[in-house]
Amino acid sequence: MTADAYVGTTSFIWLIIGAVIWIAVPVVIAIVWKIRKKEAFTTILIGAAAFLLFAMILEKLIQNVLVFPTAMGLPDQAISRFLNANPVLLALVAGLFPGIFEETGRLVAFKTVLRKRKNRETSISYGIGHGCFEVIMILGITYIEYIVFAVMINAGIFGTVIDQVVSQAPEQLSSVEAIVSMLTTFSFADLGIAFVERIFAVLFHIGASIFVFYACKNKNHFWLYPLAIILHTAMDFVAALSLFGVIELTAWALEGIVAVFGLLTFFCAYLLLYKKDHDKRK
């Protein structure tokens, strides 16, 4: 397959543009917000650090041990076999993990290192740090890897990667081949879909951060914390149903669902909590 594969110049350009966007734009957003609102940049950094710890380390570690142990070189277990044999339940667990870990990360941050920062802008600063760092880690780093893979494909040496996959993890062969197919046909539409999805995902993270901030600020509003978990779980559950083949959704249909969750969460949090907090101070 890779012997005849070739990544054209146009695809290369869109990959490079994507890598620049996914790294530069989040940084610019964070800097502009910090300057305009005179917010402590450490709040943004804490949001990024909490995402790294709770989502990329703790969540992935525990999820892989329980659900995908073979991916970590561990023996398959009864619970992982049961979940993988039931795709709907697997999708629910896949949605529940980020829901619990990421929203708990917000809760822990607001209850500890950010407990003395009571101004409403703290909630958005944290959300920007969380959401924008996710963009950099998930898309920025990934697109850099894609560029490296594209160079290897055109140089005719990517075949060695497939050989290693076949010898060490043959079940991953289809995934590697899918990456090759995607890179050789990468276009503006692919970049556009990712861009739209990230806009609404960042809005969701800001909205969820507002929810959890006010859950910590007022004990009578603590129910906003489980609400954030439910919304996060529901959004990722639908995405996982599509990923595991339970339902068939086009890329744009999936982005539409993310848009609904992102807009609903953000505007409800902004209008009902963030804006009203400002109105009370007038």
Image (cartoon, rainbow, N blue to C red):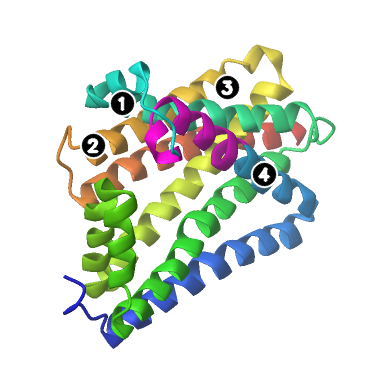
Q: Give left or right: position of 114 versus 260.
A: right
- Of label 1 and label 2, which has the lower sequence position? 1
Q: From where the camera sits, is residue 39 visible?
A: no
Q: Which residues are magenta?
A: 54-72
Element marked by disc 3:
helix
- Of label 3 and label 4, which has the lower sequence position? 4
Mark number displayed over residue 244:
2
User: Residue beneath label 3, please?
Assistant: 225
- Of label 2 and label 3, which has the lower sequence position? 3
Q: Nearer the viewer, residue 145 or 112?
A: 145
In the image, residue 94 above or below residue 192: above
The reply to whether the magenta stretch includes residue 69 is: yes
Answer few, some or many: residues within 10 Å of disc 4's Cα (few below 14, many 20 plus, some between 14 and 19): many
Q: Nearer the viewer, mark 1 or mark 3?
A: 1
- Tell whether label 2 touches label 1 (CB within 8 Å): yes
In the image, residue 217 above or below residue 163: above
Answer few, some or many: residues within 10 Å of disc 3's Cα (few below 14, many 20 plus, some between 14 and 19): many
x, y percent for residue 102 = 56, 33
Mark number displayed over residue 90:
1
> Based on the displayed image, in which of its 4 quarters is residue 27 positioned?
bottom right
Element marked by disc 1:
helix
- Tell whether label 4 touches label 3 (CB within 8 Å): no
Q: What amino acid is found at the position of numbered circle 3 in the picture?
A: Tyr
- Tell whether label 3 touches label 1 (CB within 8 Å): no
